[in-house]
Each structure stands twice: as structure tokens, then as C-alpha cells.
Amino acid sequence: MASRASQSVHALEGLKVIDMATIFAGPGAARHLADFGADVIKVEAPGGDGTRRMTWFPPEGGDSYAWKVVARNKRCVTLDLKTPAGHDALLALVQHADVLIENNRPGALERLGIGPDVLLACNPRLVILRVSGFGQTGPYSGKAGFATTAEAMSGFAAINGEPGGAPLVPPVALTDEVTAVVGAFAIMVALRHSERTGVGQVIDCNLLESAIQMMGPLPSAAAHLGYDQPRLGSGIPYSVPRGTFECSDGRWVAVSASAESVATRVVELVGLGDDPRFSTFEGRVANRDELQGTVSNWIAARTFDDVIATFENAQAAIGPVLTMRELLKDPHVVERSIFVDVDGVTMPGPIVRMSVTPGELEFAGRGENADSAEILRDLLGAWKPDTH
């Protein structure tokens, strides 16, 4: 039996969340709430959430590591929402819930007879997070939406890649993870209003607009200056030098000089401190290729340890390019316990650290239908999470 029995003070203790979303963005929002004490019931269709069968698996078999992470701290129940019994069970849970998260295509809940109007009639203070690819309205609302599509259509892929090369999407589910944070934030905003007024609401959260939020001032530059940022590899137009560079022993480092003081130190370090062309942001940008080349050659002539030590002694920003296996052993990562062991699975800890109400990981994603008996027996009348 799953339990939230820790002695820690949980900021979201007593918050009741129904997570009926799939894959990463919607369940990720619920995961962040669960990490800080919310009682999250994961509602799965018969056959289980597809995330159980995605990514990598423990050597002993069973559900995937993706499931172990995204479903952590959640209790699991299987409901067939296409049947009267499943429909009624969900509405019974909704009566006692604070939040419901779903990511069906727009209109799907309505066709099941459990659209927002029905849910809010059942519980007027309910906060409903609807996660989709493109939003609940608009010409694209009915299209299938994934992070890859959002990254392509948001302008992100167009600027990602080497000069003259193909546009690239990130090799991780970046926009799903960003949208999860956006969704969790939006839920907390809506809960603030619900707690003050007793009035719930529907949150239209989608992958495309979450990805667009990552683009900073680029929409403004395009709208007012007709500017489209070119692909610059690891570079950005307004900060030079910047990027990844290979050392003489084959290891890689990342350098950034986005602050004027840091840029000055890097320019001096590589022997260009007396050249007035590199004394301002504008000058460094105008002479990008020469400055990037000088930095690249300077680093290529030195070992990794020498480069890191020299940059750090000069208080210039640099970091090693770490593989995930290297990251797991990094001394800073280890000392801060950035990764934790949950039921024998290594995973990132809670997304932020709070001094009074820290997040806590109590169990990894559980087996299909693991908590159905408990939930259906004890919680349909009055949702009382197990506390022993």
C-alpha cells in the first residue's frame, strides 16, 4: 500500500489531484505537485499508461524508468471511462478533488460525457488543467500534438543546428518538461483563486505556447525588425564567445561570455585584451568568427584540466560537457544529492529546494492497478488518503 507517512512538512498536504493525463507533460505537472505533498491519484485506462512501456527498463524487467519517475508519489487506479461504472467512479472522485489533469485531444472528454461543464457542475471549485498540443481552440486544436511538433512550429528548431545544417529538435522531451512546469504553476495560480472564491476554472495549457515562451525576445525582433535568427550551432547572436570547444585531450568544455565582465576576462585570457574590436558587445558580435576561432584554438592547444583551471582562476565562466554517467559522479551533484534513490531507482529529486516545506520522494511509479481496491473502497465516499 502506498503511503505519505513522512514526518516532513508538506506544503501541498491535503491537496487532492486526479491525474488522468498520459506521457510526460500532464503527468509531469502532477508529479511536481505530488513531490510537495499533494495526494495524486493516477487514473489509467485498462491496459495501463503507455509510459509504462516507453524508454528504458530495469534489468529485472517491469515498468520503464520513465514511468518510475513521472508516476512517483502517485497512487494508481484503473478505470474504463467508456463504461458507466468507470464514468461514475471518476465523478465520485471529482466530488472530493481539488484538481483534475487531462491531456486528451480537445473534445474527447466532452464525447465521454465528462467535459468541463459536467466536472464543474459536480464540483464548482475544481481546477481543471487541460494539456494539448495546440490549445483548446484554433485551426490546429484537433491535431495530434507532441513536443517535437511544438519545437518545430515554435521557431525553436529553425534556430537550432549548425550554420548551413539541418534544423534540429532537442534529443529529449524538452517541451514536455517545460509544459509540465507551466502546468504546475498555472494550477497553483488557479488554486489561489479557488481557495479565495470557491470558484474553479479551466486552464488551457499547450505545448506550442509553452515552447514559444522559451524564445525570449525573438518574436519581438521578428515582428518589429523583420529579424529571423540564423542557426549558429551553440552560439547566440548577441553573446560572443559562446559555445562548446574541444580540448587537446579530446574532452569538451562549454564557455559563455554573456556578461560584459566575463567577456572581458575571456578576451584577455586568450590574448586579445589589447584589441579594441573585442572591447564591446557590438565589436565582439561584428568579429564573431575571429573571436570564436581564437578561443577554439586556445582551448584546443591545452588539456581539459588546464583549460578548466585557467578559466576558473580568471573567474571566467566555463563548465565541462558531462555525459549523464559523468554527471552522476560529479562531486557537486553528489554533495547536494541532486539524484536520489527511490525504491532502488536513481532519479532527480524535487525540482526546487524549500527551507520549510521541502519536497520528498516516497515511492517510485507503482504497478498497474496497484491502489484500485483501496481507492474504490475508501475514497469514493470521502477522499481520505492513507497516512499510516
Image (cartoon, rainbow, N blue to C red):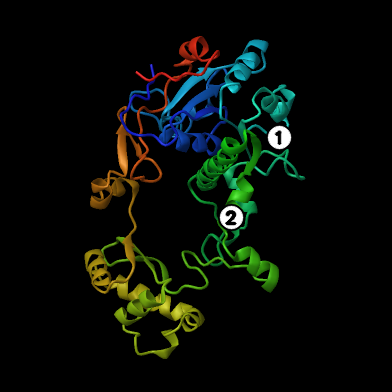
Q: Nearer the viewer, residue 145 or 340?
A: 340
Q: Nearer the viewer, residue 40 or 255?
A: 40
Q: Are marks 1 and 2 in contact (CB under 8 Å)?
A: no
Determine crowd level at label 2: few under 14, some 14-19, many 20+ residues with C-alpha closer than 10 A: few
Circle 2: residue type: Gln
Q: Residue furthest front?
A: 196
Q: Which labelled disc corresponds to residue 332?
A: none
* Residue 283 falls left or right of residue 348: right
* Residue 294 falls left or right of residue 284: left
Residue 296: image location, x then y, percent: 36, 73
* Residue in view at x 66 percent, y 28 percent: 124
- Quadrant location of residue 6? top left
**Residue tagged 2:** 213
**Residue tagged 1:** 106
* Residue in view at x 58 percent, y 46 percent: 148
From what the image shows, is residue 357 above or below residue 81?
below
